[in-house]
Image: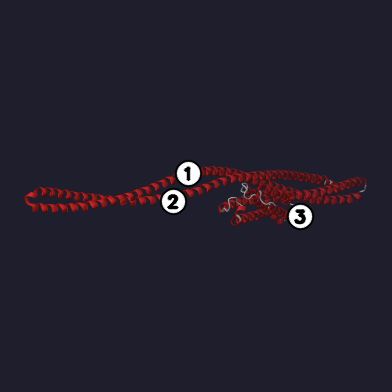
Amino acid sequence: MTATDALRQTTAKYLIPYLFVHVPVVWLTGMITGNDALIPTALAAAFAAAPAISWRLTGTGPLTRYLTAASFMLIVAVLVYAFRSHPWQIDIHMYFFAGLAMLLGFADWRVYAVATGVVAVHHLALNFTVPFWVFPQGADFFRVVLHAVIVVVETAVLAIGTLKLVDALDEATVAVRDAEEASRKAEIAQRDAEAALGQAEVAQRDAEAAGQQAQEASRRQVEAEAERVRELELIAADFEVQVGGIVKSVNSASASLKALALAMTDASEDVQGSAQNASQTTSSISGNVDAVAEASKELAASVREISAQIGKSNETTTHAVDLSSRASENVRSLTDKVGEIQNFVEVISGITEQINLLALNATIEAARAGEAGKGFAVVASEVGNLASQSAKAAEQIEQQINAVVSSTEQTSADIEAIGTSIESLREAAAIIAAAIEEQGASTQSIADNATQTAGDVSTFSALVGNVTDGVAKSASQAQDVLGASEALQGESENLAREVQAFVTKLRPADDLKEAS
């Protein structure tokens, strides 16, 4: 069993039973919030049972991993449904991100693809059909897009981390397997060497016995002994070749094991460095997100201030419209009064014409009266002059009144135009106020989401720290393997020296050959 399989079994051992913990939690949520509890509890139990059955039948195969990921996300969706109409409903969405991180132990990037697909279908489908099952304020497409972006970024990072983790586990498994194989070969070589040493000791004892017999035997036995010496030399040469080959194999295996241990150490250091860089990057991202949240809050405050100022401007504009309406009514009233004055001037003009006629008649009658009518003629002439002056004054008054009427009509038209412009300005101010109010809500939403993202980045930073610790442990184990390989290489070199010394001891038979 590989290290990856062992990690997956451990994850399934704890994660699948953890799914059943949500069943009473869903029931308690329904009781506390006052929503229905029976159907959500039954759904949570069904979703938890599906991966458990697959685990029982097929182990931690792909089907079990994919069912566990999908069921986990669906159980979180049931929790969001159970919290509907509750202020915490939007906060339960953070459990989706935590659940994605908890799937890291399966060491399979396809698990994240399945989980992300389930979350996407859940958000999109319910946002357009039953939005209050997802968001407390109802349908919000841009919020769905924001959640999707965050989920995709987290999934991408977790998938890359999973691939790196699987590669490291596979390399560690191969290195351990190679080390075990090298150790097994070393044990075999050691047993062969011990057997060869036993044979050499027997041969040495036989040679010593033959030497004693040669000293006591006749020259006829010397030739036989020389033949035996040659046979021993052949045995020693053959022994040197065979055992030397074994020692070389052990040296080669130990060198390969050392190279693998060094490669595993380098890979662990690279992964550890990447994890540290990821931790630093997440710290920087967290700081930037905090800055964005603060800036969004300040922008929201500015938007609220602008909205208040526009409200005051709207009130001022409304007052100006009222004043314009009053002025227009006053101008119309003035126009009516001027018309009445014009009628009065026409009456005066008519009276003046009558007086002129009477003065003319009086002058004619005075002329007829002769000397007696001269005084009356003077009076009639003065009356005629007064009538003429009155007529001229009436004409001047009429001209002034006509000028006033013209100015009044122009003023009335201008006031009406001003009133129309002010009304348009008030409508535009109302539209701007509504837009700024919407902008204020959007800015506040950005600030809230930035704060939430900062928390998610902190969680991911902690996860990167855990990965760094795991890689450090792998590096320590790689150092242990490196030490074992170096020790094995040293033992093989000692074995080579012992074999060479034994062969050297075995070859003094050359002196016997020269003596023969």
Q: x%, y% of residue 201?
A: 86, 46
In the drawing, what numbered circle is on residue 470? none
Q: Nearer the viewer, residue 291 or 22?
A: 22
- The residue identified by callout 3 is 56
Q: Mark 1 or mark 2: name the one nearer the start of the chain.
A: 1
Q: What is the spatial separation of the Cα atoms under label 3 and label 1, in whole angstroms? A: 64 Å
Whole-number angstrom distance, CA of label 3 to CA of label 2: 69 Å
**Residue holding disc 1:** 308
Q: Amino acid at mark 3?
A: Arg
For mark 1, give the secondary structure: helix
- Separation (CA) of disc 1 from disc 2: 16 Å
Q: Which mark is residue 427?
A: 2
Residue 281 is drawn in which quadrant?
A: top right
Counting the numbered discs, the total is: 3
Q: Position of residue 501 (x, y in %)?
A: 80, 44
Label 1 CA crowd tier, 10 Å (few <14, some 14–19, many 20+): some
Amino acid type, callout 2: Glu
Label 3 sits on a secondary structure element that is helix
